[in-house]
Image: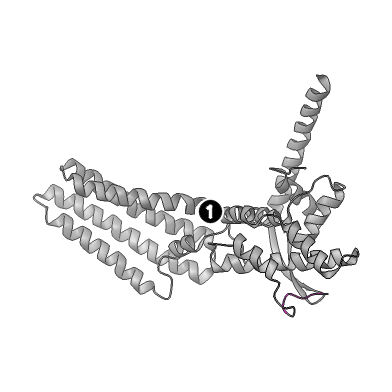
Amino acid sequence: MHLKGTLPLLVLRVLGSGPKHGYRIAQEIKDTSKGVLDFREGTLYPTLHAQENKGLIESFEMKEKGRTRRYYRLTDEGRRVLATEREAWRRLSVAVNTVLEGT
Amino acid sequence: MMNAVEEPRFPEVDHWLSVATRKLCSTSKERIRREIEEHYFEAIDAAKSQGSGEAAARRRAIESLGDPRSAARSFRRHHLTKFQAGFVRGLGEKRSIHRFYLWGIVMILFLAMNFIRVSNVWDLGIYLGMFSVMLAAFVAHFWWTRWFYRHQQARASLTLDMFSTWVFFASMQFGSSLLWYKNMVADAFVYGAALLFLLTILAVLLRKMSDRPPKSA
């Protein structure tokens, strides 16, 4: 399924449960949606960097099993935006469903 | 378990990265390379743990990254290109003296071009005012760029750096209209063309610089 425009929100939501590296974020979106939300993983990184530039998430490097991984976590601003965007998305989906089921 | 440092190069991911990071500045390239390679190795490990052979795992891992040209377009929206990075840095800290000379030459030319035409006190006042603005822009531009390098805090300093540059361009605009008013159409056209060119570059840069760059790369 095409994720245009929704990937930033999904990333924020996944990071809401704690710091994760890029691969883990991609897999969690796919696994949680049972494969419905599939996307090319190369597009995840521009999204992560854009959100980091906006101050919604921050990154740090950590050694794990001999590898240096870059982890991402939500900032306070990111948490605030996530709450706002989730509510906006909920209202939108309710409205769309109402229209779809009413016709 | 593979390691990005110990393992030999993987030509498929090298190729993917060379396309996806084309035109980006070296800092951005390096950061993206490390992240994508790590992602790639993780994907290979996952595929192998599901029973794929080495070749199949590598194929799946590279396919999962998608089209590198599409990624390149996205990366260029959020990272500075080589050209933009060079423009932001000006001539760079190591060659900052060249920047100093460049600004000096521009001001001297500007002054020479305009003071030659001074015919009354009113004109002198205008040109002195323009010179003061340019001098202030020069000092701010030079100072804040050095501050940026010292602290690596791009947002505030670059905003001010850009602001000082804009002040300089504003003085150019002022000069352009003045020349136009005096029927010096060719000079006004050159001013206007230079202004338009630089504003086009700055429009892109300002959009990127309005974001906060990563603290570490």
Residue A65 covered by magenta stretch: no
User: Can residue B108 be spotted in the picture?
Assistant: yes
The image quadrant of residue B87 is bottom left
Please tell me which residue is depicted at 49% across the width and 64% down the height of the picture. B82
Q: Is residue B125 left or right of residue A6?
A: left
Q: Is residue B59 left or right of residue B73?
A: right
Please tell me which residue is depicted at 16% across the width and 46% down the height of the picture. B184
Look at the image and name its color scheme. one colour
Give amino acid for label 1: Lys
Q: Residues within 10 Å of mark 1 (few under 14, many from 20)?
A: some
Q: Which residue is mark 1?
A: B208
Residue B195 image point, x, y percent: 33, 50
Residue projecting furthest to the left: B119
Residue projecting furthest to the front: B55
Boundaries of the magenta span: B1-5
Q: Is residue B185 left or right of residue A98?
A: left
Viewer-proximal residue among A23 and B71 = B71
Residue B15 image point, x, y percent: 64, 66
Please tell me which residue is depicted at 15% across the width and 43% down the height of the picture. B182
